[in-house]
Image: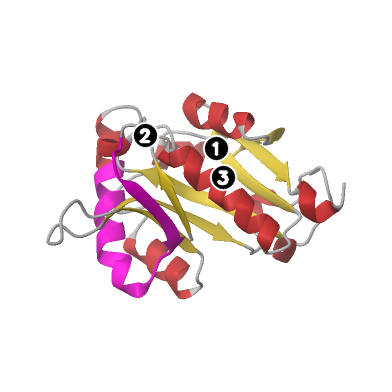
Amino acid sequence: MVNCRMKDCGRVMLIEKATANDIDEIEKMYYAVTEYLENTINYPAWINGLYPTRETFEEAVSKENMYVARKSAGTLDEGSKIVAGMVLKSEEEPEFSGIEWQIEAEASETYALCTLAVSADFTGCGIGEAMVRFAIELAEKNGKKAIRLDVTEINAAAIALYEKLGFKYIDTMDAGVEYEREYGQRIFRLYEKLVQAELHI
């Protein structure tokens, strides 16, 4: 859990693990983000009804892998609002197999950062960066060796953020023509950040 005041957002943001009570609001936020992407430039190649779905969030919450950022209430009756989300999991990712990472590590010793989204109403507030920094701090706290992720090659803003925060480009992955037909993208860049504090460097 972390409290932070975001640029131009005016109110304190709380980043914490999501609960089952949050699933409806998480689904609504992601649906709106994906709808916006589908109508503009779909950088992550998400499609409503295909990915991410309610089942994505239900599974992540059940495994305690889902984290959200909340905007604090402006008034007593306004309530807080989920404005960002991400999944941090320590499970085998099929697309990560056979990759020459910077360090050898079991999936249980790493985090795969995925499904990071920020509400379109809160872009430019630094929430995405705060979420990734939170992931790095959590990895250090929980003794992980690295954080790994994939990002579409056209997602320049996300790539710039990850590189700014010390993620190293590792390889390029081709998801194949069938994936491209369904989602519109096929080339992904793989990144990894070593969690130095736990490597005793």
Residue highlighted by disc 3: 133
Mark toward the start of the polypeptide (2 vs 3): 2
Amino acid type indicated by mark 2: Cys
Q: Is residue 176 visible?
A: no
Q: As rendered, which of 133 and 45 lies closer to the eye?
A: 133
Measured along the vertical axis of the image, is residue 67 above or below residue 42? below
Q: CA distance from mark 2 to mark 1?
A: 21 Å
Residue highlighted by disc 2: 125
Q: Are marks 1 and 3 in contact (CB under 8 Å)?
A: no
Amino acid type indicated by mark 3: Arg
Q: As rendered, which of 37 and 89 lies closer to the eye?
A: 89
Residue highlighted by disc 1: 151
Q: Is residue 122 left or right of residue 136?
A: left
Residue 94 included in the magenta stretch of the image: no
Residue at x 45%, y 47% (from the top left corner): 116
Q: Secondary structure at mark 1?
A: strand
Residue at x 36%, y 30% (from the top left corner): 124
The residues colored magenta run 9-34
Residue at x 76%, y 55% (from the top left corner): 145
Q: Quadrant of residue 138?
A: bottom right
